[in-house]
Image (cartoon, rainbow, N blue to C red):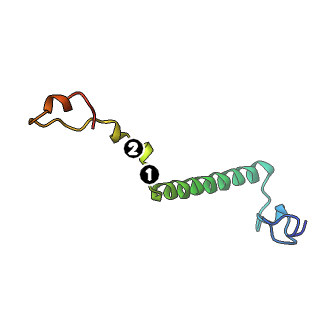
Amino acid sequence: MSGAQNPGRPAGQDPGTHLSVVRGDPGPEEVAALVAVLTARARAAQAAREAEESARRPRSAWRDRSRLLRRPVHPGPSAWARSFHPG
């Protein structure tokens, strides 16, 4: 595959070249365990980045539940009318 066919991967690089064994002879289970750990860490890092990004975004006023609460009633003229009607 070339870079033009798959834009996410550089030209001349197949999926098996991202991980290479430098020393030893790991079995298929060991390689699978390593890939699982690396995948889990990458997903956790991505989730942390997304959570940080969503925390920076301003919250919509539509999602603000404090607007559902009634304002406190203070004694004074027409306080009886404000005790029933919100706002």
Going by the picture, which residue comes out furthest to the right? 1
* Residue drawn at x 53%, y 55% as measured from the top left: 48
Q: How crowded is mark 1: few (under 14 residues within 10 Å), some or many (20 or more)?
A: few
Whole-percent x, y for residue 17 in the image? 81, 66
Q: Residue 64 carries which label?
A: 2
Residue 78 sits in which quadrant? Answer: top left
- The quarter holding residue 86 reads top left
Secondary structure beneath dot 1 equals loop
Q: How far apart are marks 2 and 1 (CA)?
A: 8 Å
> What residue is shown at x 67% (from left), y 53% (from top)?
39
The residue lying furthest to the bottom in this view is: 11
The location of residue 11, given as percent across then percent down, is 85, 72
- Name the residue type under label 2: Asp
Residue at point 27% right, 38% down?
Answer: 87
Numbered tag placed on residue 44 in the rendering: none
> Which comes sooner in the sequence, label 2 or label 1?
1
The answer to whether residue 1 is above or below residue 37 is below
Residue identifier under label 1: 59
Q: Is mark 2 on a helix, strand or loop?
A: loop
Give percent across and percent down for residue 63: 44, 43
Q: Which corner quadrant holds the N terminus?
A: bottom right
Quick check: 25 left or right of 40? right
Q: Is 30 drawn above or below residue 9 in the view shown?
A: above
What is the number of callouts on the image? 2
Labelled pair 2, 1 in contact (Cβ < 8 Å):
yes
The residue lying toward the viewer, choosing from 6 and 66, is 66
- Within 10 Å of disc 2 (Cα), the crowding (few <14, some 14-19, many 20+) is few
